[in-house]
Amino acid sequence: MRSSIGGPRVMLRRLRETMAEPVTAQERLDRIVVLVAANMVAEVCSVYVMRGDSSLELFATEGLNREAVHKTTMTVGQGLVGVIAREAQALNLPDAQSHPAFAYFPETGEEIYQSFLGVPILRGGQTLGVIVVQNMAPRTYSEEEVEALQTIAIVLAEMIASGELQTLARPGTELALQRPQQLMGRSFADGIALGHVVMHEPRVRVTQLIAEDSSAELERLDAALESLKSSVDTLMQHPAIRDGGGDHVDVLESYRMFARDRGWARRIREAINTGLTAEAAVERVQNDSRAQLIRQTDPYVRERLHDLDDLANRLLRELVGWSGHAGSGQLPQSAIVVARNMGPAELLDYDRANLRGLVLEEGSPTAHVIIVARALGIPCVGQVDGVLDLVRTGDAIIVDGGAAEVHVRPASDVENSYVDKVRMRAKRQERYQELRDVPTRTKDGVDLTLMMNAGLGVDLPHVEETGAAGIGLFRTELQFMLATRFPRIGEQEAFYRTVLESAGDKPVVFRALDIGGDKILPYLRQDEEPNPALGWRAIRIALDRPALLKAQMRALLRAASGRKLSVMFPMVTEVAEFDAARAIVEEETERLRKFGRKLPTSIDLGVMVEVPALIWQIDELASKADFLSIGSNDLFQFVYAVDRENARMAQRFDQLSVPMLRIIKTVNEAAESNGIPLSLCGELASHPLTAMALAAAGLRTISMAAAAVGPVKAMLLSLDLEKASAFLEEALDNPPKDLRKAMIGFARDNQVDLDI
Ligand code: PEP
Ligand code: MG
């Protein structure tokens, strides 16, 4: 049996020289195949590169007919090379022709070769190509030879990923990581952004692949592993994580597991011993692990793969001495941040002047980072499967938040159509600006009040910019969610005062702390609940832990001294809960009075109608509460028994439905007959079509996302409300099959401006 000449180390040394030579990409590839064939004493060495999604092309060969280069192609799954590409796994065959997948390509002249070793060229879990060696005589390639070929594959992966080989591709055929991709996700925040990719956790690009001194590389690895271990340990000891429990701990536990996994470190060491730098060795081991784990369908295992990816990336960053994430550095212009997931505080670290959009591989539409993204006006698409593997820093990218589409490296026609779309939207924005000070009056003369929802400091300028009549829902819990501990009373008071001052004479409705369910405070100990949405949350927590509510009420009363204060309570289920909350506010007011503090000029206390049981208590409530506000997001969740967090259920039922509108109408009539003001502040108010239905159902005050104020006002100005009310009345009496369609039809027939 033949054996390699000089072994892998010699081959790598030669390879390093080849990589440094100033030759064309084709010449470099040609030299690599000659070098590999000679070193492995193989008659053939060939490189196949993926183009498009489904085919491979012969890019270089030593031993096969050179005429076939850039001519022979095969689909993924076809022939041995196609199988390697599909399975992302090496094939080592002493008798290749007896393999069921063997396919014969006459132009290559490969029929005389019996033994075959092929390994995939992988990067970030994606197959970019295949490298093959062949011999006439039957032979089994040694473990060492397989390793050596895998190392060469890493070098080739970098050549492909860097775009160096794109120049060799036939015109019109894009290589992997170069071609345009259209990815679908879920719409998390509306808007369109064109820009360039910034990886939230940048992948380290390994440029130095071959080591000059392996023992120095081993030392570098040991030092990096040590500092990785201690940084994970420090993270685990962080009080927010240590006491917070839940997902954080799970993820970090698996980090710790891998960071301490001797097998992982051993495999990296072995790869260094083949002549790679520490960085290239980490990349190589990561590629292998990915190839093994990626075929697993078990979501738990796939989740651990993500963890392992993150950890490998952390280790690489330790090796090259990077720290922090992209938000802590200088952000290029028109940056679109791509991340697996992130927390709200991390998003706020980015320079708002250059941040244009956000793409998440995971995430959920009601996660706080998304609430922050919306507040910042940043379009966001989430749950974009595989996006981290498909993009690189600097790639052109378009985020279409409304359509839930992401275009990576878009073709020029796609880009042009988006440039037009953006222009159109900008024109509409100008129109909304012109409407800012126009009273919100329907065509037939009915006045409505459009308020906006807020929760962060960044929301506040929008009151002025949009011309909203005030803040109809201020989500106070966001300040708590961004903090690492309970904000002190003084901090709360200062923040509330800023909110009131920025609203000027306009009213602000503060919502008392609405935590629990999906809104987690990492520093508040909460037991795991089987159905958190139905569990210990909002006013239920507030009444069980009155110190929290007292502190917040004291802060609000102080902040609003000398002006009006409006506070509403979320998730009230029984009138008695409201009585108890009112008693706390009165107690706090009394306390401040005793201390001689200046009190608010009036204190209005309201109730959010979110729990269906309240619908049958409106009359009793109306005699006690000063106002009501329908929280349509939660109300829909409970009326339809659909978890608002569950992506699978998100499209199943429509909020614009006969039952929802009947309920809203009933509540409105009850509020009217009791003479108590009513508004609605859930998502239903944030779209012109659904807002039209709310107005038709009788609501005269609604509160919505800041960006919706202009479009909803434009709709109302074009609406004959009497006609719309009659149309809805008829639809509720004789329900159409699809209320949404019927309402769109009404709008179209009556030239209502729906912004679609
Ligand atoms: C609602 O439930 O409709 C609401 C406005 O509150 P949140 O979305 O914050 O639960
Ligand atoms: Mg709610």
Image: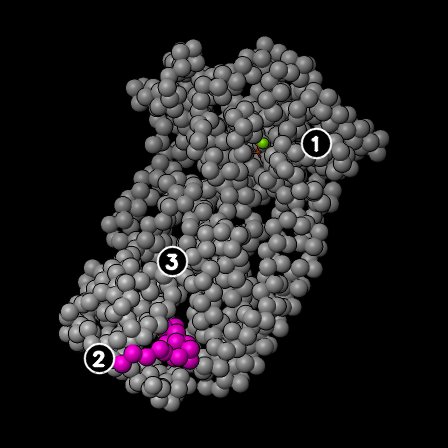
Q: Nearer the viewer, mark 3 or mark 2?
A: 2
Question: Marks 1 and 2, how far apart in space?
Answer: 76 Å
**Rendered image quadrant of residue 135:** bottom left
Front residue of 250/468: it is: 250
Mark 3 or mark 1: which comes first in sequence?
3
User: Where is residue 644 drawn, in percent x and y?
Assistant: 52, 34
The residue positioned 28% from the left and 59% from the top of the image is 76
Residue 143 is a magenta residue: yes
Mark 3 or mark 2: which comes first in sequence?
2
Circle 3 SS class: helix
The residue positioned 58% from the left and 13% from the top of the image is 670
Label 3–label 1 contact, CB within 8 A = no
In the rendering, which numbered label is found on residue 540?
1
Circle 1 SS class: helix
Is residue 394 among the parts visible in the rendering? no
| Residue occupied by mark 3 | 390
Label 3–label 2 contact, CB within 8 A = no
Front residue of 489/533: it is: 533
User: Where is residue 27 drawn, in percent x and y?
Assistant: 24, 79
Residue 497 is a magenta residue: no
User: Where is residue 91 drawn, in percent x and y?
Assistant: 35, 69
The residue positioned 54% from the left and 28% from the top of the image is 641
Q: From which residue to which does the magenta span run?
A: 137-154
Residue type, mark 1 in image: Arg
The residue positioned 46% from the left and 86% from the top of the image is 212
Residue type, mark 3 in image: Leu
| Residue occupied by mark 2 | 63
Which colour style is shown?
one colour
